[in-house]
Amino acid sequence: MKPSVFSLLSVLLYITILFPQQFSAAADSRNRVLHTACAQTKSPDVCISAIQSDPRSAAAKGDVRVFSLIALEKALSEIGGMKERCPEVYRRLIGDAGDAIKKLKARRDVPSVNLSIRSAIKDVVTCSKGEDIVLTLLGISKDVLNIIN
């Protein structure tokens, strides 16, 4: 049986008009969660920019754990100068941030993740010389999780 012109037009109408609207609604929902999570931080604009710059944020479907993970990894990418200045603090920071990353990936409870992030923040403060962006990103990583609590 041949499909009718009407049924073909109906399918075409759905694909061209309704499907993009559904996709757009999902994107709006993700953006709303990102903006709500970043509003919990001291630097909402930095938060939004840092998280949206990572392709995983689009696939995160509003999962604030992914947002926290992205901010943590971006913070770690900014700590290069600390390795020479404060090698012991650098090692602790890598350990504490790595612990937080493992807990986030294992979907552990938020207080446990926050404890590891707070330890990482203390590490940076101990040897802070211009690592304001690191402190900001670590704070973002901790604060976006507040939406879960």
Image (tube, grey):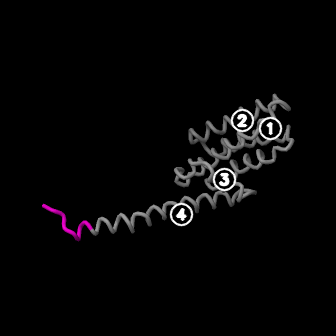
Q: Residue 96 carries which label?
A: 2
Q: Which residue matches tag 1?
A: 123
SS category of the residue bearing label 3: helix
Q: In this view, does 21 lie above or below 100?
A: below
Q: Quadrant of residue 91?
A: top right
Q: Is residue 113 left or right of residue 6?
A: right
Q: Earlier in the sequence, mark 4 or mark 2?
A: 4
- Distance of mark 4 from mark 1, alpha carbons? 37 Å
SS category of the residue bearing label 4: helix
- Distance of mark 1 from mark 3, alpha carbons? 20 Å
Q: Which mark is residue 21?
A: none
- The residue depicted at 83 percent of the width and 30 percent of the height is 84
Q: Residue 144 carries which label?
A: 3
Q: Nearer the viewer, residue 62 or 134?
A: 134
- The residue depicted at 85 percent of the width and 44 percent of the height is 130
Q: Which of marks 1 and 3 is nearer the N terminus?
A: 1
